[in-house]
Image (cartoon, grey):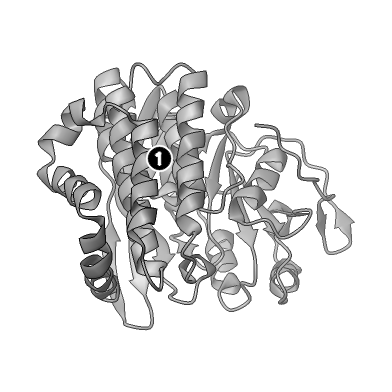
């Protein structure tokens, strides 16, 4: 996938920075209307124990003063040299903004932070040291999910496998069970460059696409059993605005993911796991997205989503992972055979469940 976004020269205040030395980690932050949270986010990066890192701020053309706030915040700071600034050509969404950051990144590893989140001071030093210890292409931690309005917190933990060499057996297990927490990883930049792994243009599930491509290519993996990323839940986030057609973006992203797996010769080896990923993160998630966002859900739409599913995974009923997971199997049967019932009953159940958080 070719990157078409233009890179803006790198400025801090009035000083042009020319830095071609490789850092240990490049942290990329897409920024769009983040003035209420960006100070905390930047503070957490200024306070990192890891000294040799760069922070790439990508302006995605918000309407507030986020970028000016960052520039003012770091203007007199001794670590301002770590910061680079760039812009997308026009407001394009976080995936495209991250791609612009990837074009500029010089780090051995790459990481991503959202502008309303923040990280613990030892996050990147811990991840980097652990990654180097195991020569890992991927290294992840866990996180704290926070809802400040309801004073709620819980730990988001990913699955882990044996550290070091990422065997086919472990990779199959990981693919079938991983959580889509792409912020909690550092990614070896050489893998991204050599295999042209970037974010797709869609504005839904672009993070799952990016993470899955990296899992497929990773030859080694490591983890730190500690919650070090703070994911802040915001009910007013753009990603949570009602959009009953958003599911189409998700399906498009996953069609692109399957094309990637086939083009890069991973599909045959990991067919069972990739189909299971599609079942959970594309088909069922698209259905949930549609039912919770549509004012008057239509059975025809559920049938269309199912048709996309069987086009991508025509033999899914033979999939061993599908067969052994009763709840997923039951859900598919209900949605396929009783779409009118699903449209009538499920929206209120789903909304009640999600309103708990």
**Viewer-proximal residue, 357 or 37?**
357
- The residue drawn where x is 75% and y is 54% is 88
Q: How many marks?
A: 1
Tell me residue 85's x, y (percent).
75, 55
Tell me residue 129's x, y (percent).
43, 38
**Viewer-proximal residue, 163 or 284?**
284
In the rendered view, would you say 12 is above or below 148? Answer: above
**Viewer-proximal residue, 300 or 149?**
300
Left or right of 31 in this view: 37 = left
Picture quarter with the C terminus = bottom left
In the rendered view, would you say 343 is above or below 263? Answer: below
Q: Which type of secondary structure does the marked residue at label 1 adopt?
A: helix
Question: Is residue 143 at all visible to an observer of this figure?
Answer: no
Q: Residues within 10 Å of mark 1 (few under 14, many from 20)?
A: some
Residue beneath label 1, please?
308
Tell me residue 147's x, y (percent).
36, 75
- When asked about the image quadrant of residue 159, the answer is top left
Question: Is residue 326 at all visible to an observer of this figure?
Answer: yes
**Viewer-proximal residue, 255 or 53?**
255
In the rendered view, would you say 346 is above or below 333? Answer: below
């Amino acid at each position: 996938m070719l990157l078409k976004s233009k890179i803006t020269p790198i400025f801090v205040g009035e000083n042009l920075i020319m830095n071609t030395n490789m850092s240990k980690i490049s942290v990329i932050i897409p920024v769009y209307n983040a003035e209420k949270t960006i100070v905390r986010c930047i503070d957490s990066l200024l306070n990192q124990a890891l000294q040799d890192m760069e922070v790439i701020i990508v302006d995605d053309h918000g309407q507030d003063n986020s970028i000016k706030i960052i520039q003012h915040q770091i203007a007199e700071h001794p670590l301002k040299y770590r910061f680079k600034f760039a812009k997308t050509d026009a407001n394009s969404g976080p995936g495209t903004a991250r791609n612009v950051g990837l074009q500029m990144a010089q780090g051995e590893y790459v990481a991503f932070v959202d502008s309303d989140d923040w990280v613990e001071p030892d996050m990147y030093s811990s991840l980097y040291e652990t990654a180097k210890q195991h020569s890992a292409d991927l290294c992840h931690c866990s996180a704290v999910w926070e809802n400040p309005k309801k004073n709620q917190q819980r730990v988001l933990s990913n699955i882990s496998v044996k550290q070091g060499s990422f065997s086919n057996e472990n990779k199959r297990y990981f693919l079938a069970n991983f959580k889509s927490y792409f912020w909690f990883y550092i990614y070896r930049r050489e893998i991204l460059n050599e295999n042209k792994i970037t974010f797709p243009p869609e504005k839904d599930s672009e993070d799952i696409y990016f993470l899955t491509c990296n899992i497929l290519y990773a030859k080694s993996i490591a983890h730190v059993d500690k919650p070090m990323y703070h994911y802040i839940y915001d009910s007013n986030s753009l990603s949570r605005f009602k959009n009953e057609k958003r599911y189409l973006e998700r399906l498009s992203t996953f069609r692109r993911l399957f094309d990637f797996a086939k083009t890069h010769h991973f599909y045959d080896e990991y067919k069972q796991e990739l189909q299971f990923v599609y079942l959970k993160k594309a088909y069922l998630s698209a259905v949930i997205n549609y039912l919770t966002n549509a004012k008057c859900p239509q059975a025809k739409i559920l049938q269309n989503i199912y048709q996309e599913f069987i086009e991508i995974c025509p033999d899914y009923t033979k999939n061993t992972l599908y067969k052994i997971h009763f709840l997923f199997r039951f859900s598919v049967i209900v949605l396929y055979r009783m779409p009118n019932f699903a449209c009538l009953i499920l929206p209120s159940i789903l909304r009640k469940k999600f309103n708990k958080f």
